[in-house]
Each structure stands twice: as C-alpha cells, then as structure tokens.
Image (cartoon, rainbow, N blue to C red):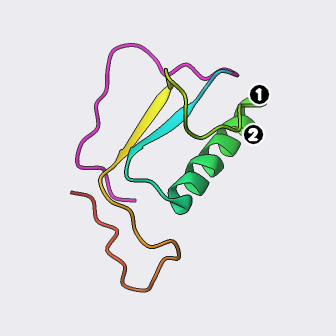
Amino acid sequence: MPMPAKAQVGPGQLPIGQSFSVVLTRAKNQRLKNAVGRFRDEVSRRTGMPLATEVEGSTNPTLTVEVEHVGKEIPELGEDESYN
C-alpha cells in the first residue's frame, strides 16, 4: 500500500480499549465504511476485546480518517488508487 501524502503523528500512544472509535471525515461511502469495519474487527480479533460497532458519529474519536475523495463503490480495473 502506498504511503499517505500526509500523516500527523503526535506525542503519546494510540489507546485501544472498548471505547475505541473511528470517524471518517469529509468524503465517505459504503466501501470506506466497510474498510473501517474490517480494521475494527481485526483490532478486536488481535486484542481479544469486543469493540463498538459504530463507525461514525463519535464526538471524540480515538482515530480520525480524513478522505479527500472516494472511489467507486465497486473497484474497477485501472482505478486510480494514488495518494496525493
């Protein structure tokens, strides 16, 4: 996977507990929501902790994913997956 154009790393750690939440900002579609759900499920599987199923709507999310524009709901051959 290519690296994102911008990533902000702050001091401290990313706490993962049962209150862990992810919010998509700006552009979003079902494909992105599904990807966040798969990420959440993988974190839950690896930690052994059940995590909330809500993908968006948190007022104080643990992790914010900002997407400038979305691809099509069903990926196509030759789709531009570049970061900028």
- Give the Cα distance between marks 2 and 1: 7 Å
Q: Residue drawn 51% across and 25% down?
A: 62
The N terminus - image quarter: bottom left
Along the line of sight, the residue nearer the viewer: 39 or 64:
64
Q: Residue drawn 49% across and 59% down?
A: 29
Residue for badge 2:
45
Picture quadrant where residue 82 is located: bottom left
Q: Which residues are magenta?
A: 1-18
- Please give left or right for residue 25 compared with residue 49 in the image: left
Residue for badge 1:
49
Q: Is residue 73 above or below residue 21?
A: below
**Residue 45 shown in magenta:** no
Q: Is residue 63 above or below residue 28?
A: above
Mark 2 surroundings: few (<14), some (14-19) or many (≥20) residues within 10 A: few
**Residue 10 shown in magenta:** yes
- Please give left or right for residue 28 compared with residue 18 in the image: left
Where is residue 69? Give x, y as percent: 32, 59
Q: Are marks 2 and 1 in contact (CB under 8 Å)?
A: no
Q: Residue drawn 38% across and 53% down?
A: 27
The C terminus - image quarter: bottom left
Query: What's under tag 2, amino acid-wise?
Result: Arg
Query: What's under tag 1, amino acid-wise?
Result: Met
